[in-house]
Amino acid sequence: MTERSIRPRRLRSTPAMRRLVAETRLHPADLVLPMFVREGISEPQEIGSMPGVVHHSIDSLKHAVEAAAEAGIGGVMLFGVPEHKDAIGSGATDPDGILNAGARAAVDAAGDAIVVQTDLCLDEFTDHGHCGVLDALGRVDNEATLERYAEMALVQAASGAQILGLSGMMDGQTAVVREALEGAGFVDTAILAYAAKYASAYYGPFREAVNSSLVGDRRTYQMDAANRREGMLEVEIDIAEGADIVMVKPAGSYLDVLADVASQSPVPVWAYQVSGEYAMIEAAAANGWIDRERAIDESVLAIKRAGADVVLTYWAMELAQRLSNTGLRA
Ligand code: PBG
């Protein structure tokens, strides 16, 4: 045996061989499709900054959730786009508010075949666009916001959401929501804590998607992109407070944080491939600068390789359809 007999290329020699030795695979059940449901529309509407993604009416949402279940996707994550906003985000706790009505419709359409989840955050519902309520000086008030989150949790759980996505980055949010759920008997409602959520420019297209009225930024509550160790701290806190699942977000630019979390977390670790990650590939592909399908597959595979058990991606439907053609792909 000489060193020359060591040839890693052997296992790359044919498509069948490469498929056999692949360390990471995508599967439709490992994907969650984020969806927007908008009040006051009767037809789906394209979102300009996210080509291929729409605002759903309640009706079109139902069909899309059915289709997602049919495609074998693991879950849907619903975001609401209300017609009216106010300082405390009243629409978020109105049982007939668009997100809660959307959750009921989604559960009704396919709740046995797919896990219906709701975003638990106030930014879509507040006129100032922040994820919480403001104090007299205009700062995001952590404790007052927690009270609103607890109310939201109960309304969302009552609407049938099986997992609540706590994306607001307030301190103590997981504990407060867990306590509220337990107190009201919603012992089976799971909490997905957006534990390591960074203040990111990659949320840009999403802000258009939810007609965000935010002026300024979210840097007093979302994490600083410079910090890796702190990602683990946030995860530990959320797990101690009762999170069933933890999230790292965004995904592609935070694979180091994701790998850290995946190596240490005793609960499932999910990652959110956000709107900007989607828009960049779509835009480059539209210009003919990148191979769209290969870039999509590679971007999502990399997130799984780094350690995500599940990936939230706006390409979930397309990927599920592509993955169901089980034959070899070049
Ligand atoms: C907050 C929330 C945001 C996203 C998901 N939940 C926006 C923000 O924090 O500003 C962004 C998702 C994306 O960009 O795809 N409710």
Image (tube, rainbow, N blue to C red):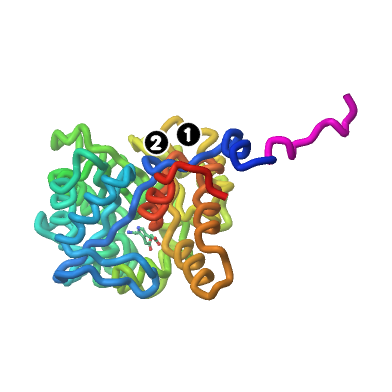
Please say if the residues under marks 1 and 2 sit with CB atoms less than 8 Å apart.
yes
Q: Residue furthest top?
A: 1
Which quadrant would the N terminus be assigned to in this image?
top right
| Residue 84 in the figure: left or right of residue 310 | left
Q: Is residue 222 above or below residue 190?
A: below
Of callouts 1 and 2, which one flags the residue occurring earlier in the amino acid sequence? 2
Q: Looking at the picture, how far across and down is residue 307, in whole percent?
A: 52, 40
Label 1 sits on what residue type? Ser
| Residue 17 in the figure: left or right of residue 35 | right
317 vs 122, nearest the viewer: 317
Report whether residue 4 is seen: yes
Q: What is the magenta range?
A: 1-12
Q: Secondary structure at mark 1?
A: loop
Q: Which mark is residue 239?
A: 2
Name the residue tied to disc 1: 265
Q: Residue furthest right?
A: 2
Q: Is residue 193 magenta?
A: no
Q: Is residue 316 above or below residue 22?
A: below
Q: Residue furthest left?
A: 96
| Image depth: mark 1 or mark 2 in front | 1
93 vs 179, nearest the viewer: 93
Q: In percent of the image, x 49 and y 51: which residue is there?
A: 300
Q: Secondary structure at mark 2?
A: helix
